[in-house]
């Protein structure tokens, strides 16, 4: 069920974005957006490619991928941006001894980067359209449920987790669907540095890996 829902979301989101992008290219930008493009663009929404919902007769699970971003224009076609994202997990299982609903944070990420917009008319708003970006990121992922770890004769509660730095080159497009509703679609590849496990690097993990991203984000913005 979860894989089918993920695939359906990706297909519908991609179709919507491609159709909207084609319509946007055929239309002239509004005068206000041309003359007064936002110097600072603030965004809050969802990363739709991580949205997931599964259920059965005894339980259900909802993964809500929140995304917050800020983009500051430093030149007519260039901007710096930062982005924070968190996957908020909520589960309910009736078969537990006490039952009930529980939540958690299985993954989060922080990214900073620079974007260069190209291919639009000279007078078009510079924080919308097609772009290339260089992005540095750090992804944190919980690997297992919290447990008790014995260290130095003592016991402490610990959550096994991995922190993975990376650098990506992405191609994307950002456009408005409404004065305060916009989408940001991008994809690309990069290099992943050796991961830190509970903020410590394990021996023998000094190799770098290739990584990839495909993102569909829907935002409310100024």
Image: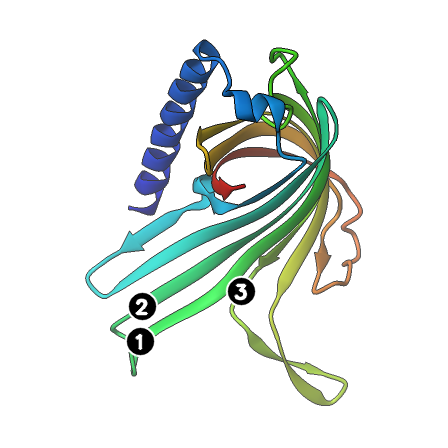
Mark drawn on residue 144: 3
Disc 1 and disc 2 in contact, CB within 8 angstroms: yes
Q: Compare residues 41 and 135 and report the one nearer the observer.
A: 41
| Location of mark 1 (residue) | 100
Labels 3 and 1: the sequence-earlier one: 1
Residue 89, position as x, y percentages in the image: 43, 60
Residue 76: % across, % down: 72, 22
Q: Residue at x 63, y 14 (%)?
A: 123
Measured Cα–Cα span from mark 1 to mark 2: 6 Å
Percent coordinates x, y for residue 43 in the rendering: 55, 44
* Residue 81, quarter of picture: top right
Q: Which mark is residue 92?
A: 2
Query: Which label's residue is closer to the chain start, 3 or 2?
Result: 2
Q: Residue at x 19, y 62 (%)?
A: 57
Q: CA distance from mark 3 to mark 1?
A: 20 Å
Q: Residues within 10 Å of mark 1 (few under 14, many from 20)?
A: few
Q: Is 131 displayed left or right of 76 in the figure?
A: left
Q: Residue at x 45, y 34 (%)?
A: 179
Q: Do callouts 3 and 2 mark residues in contact (Cβ within 8 Å)?
A: no
Q: Nearer the viewer, residue 209 or 38?
A: 38
């Amino acid at each position: 069920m979860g894989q089918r829902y993920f695939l359906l979301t990706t297909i519908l989101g991609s179709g919507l974005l491609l159709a909207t992008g084609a319509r946007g290219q055929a239309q002239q930008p509004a005068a206000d957006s041309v003359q007064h493009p936002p110097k600072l663009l603030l965004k809050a929404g969802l990363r739709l490619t991580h949205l997931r919902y599964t259920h059965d007769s005894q339980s259900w699970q909802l993964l809500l991928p929140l995304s917050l971003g800020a983009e500051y224009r430093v030149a007519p076609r260039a901007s710096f941006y930062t982005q924070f994202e968190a996957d908020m997990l909520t589960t309910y299982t009736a078969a537990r001894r006490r039952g009930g609903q529980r939540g958690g944070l299985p993954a989060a990420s922080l990214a900073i980067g620079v974007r260069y917009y190209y291919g639009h008319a000279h007078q078009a708003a510079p924080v919308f359209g097609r772009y290339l970006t260089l992005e540095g990121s750090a992804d944190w992922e919980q690997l297992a449920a919290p447990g008790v770890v014995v260290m130095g004769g003592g016991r402490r509660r610990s959550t096994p987790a991995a922190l993975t730095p990376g650098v990506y080159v992405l191609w994307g497009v950002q456009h408005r669907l409404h004065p305060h509703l916009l989408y940001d679609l991008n994809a690309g590849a990069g290099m992943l540095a050796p991961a830190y496990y509970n903020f410590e690097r394990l021996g023998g993990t000094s190799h770098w890996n290739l990584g990839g991203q495909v993102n569909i984000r829907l935002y409310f913005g100024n």
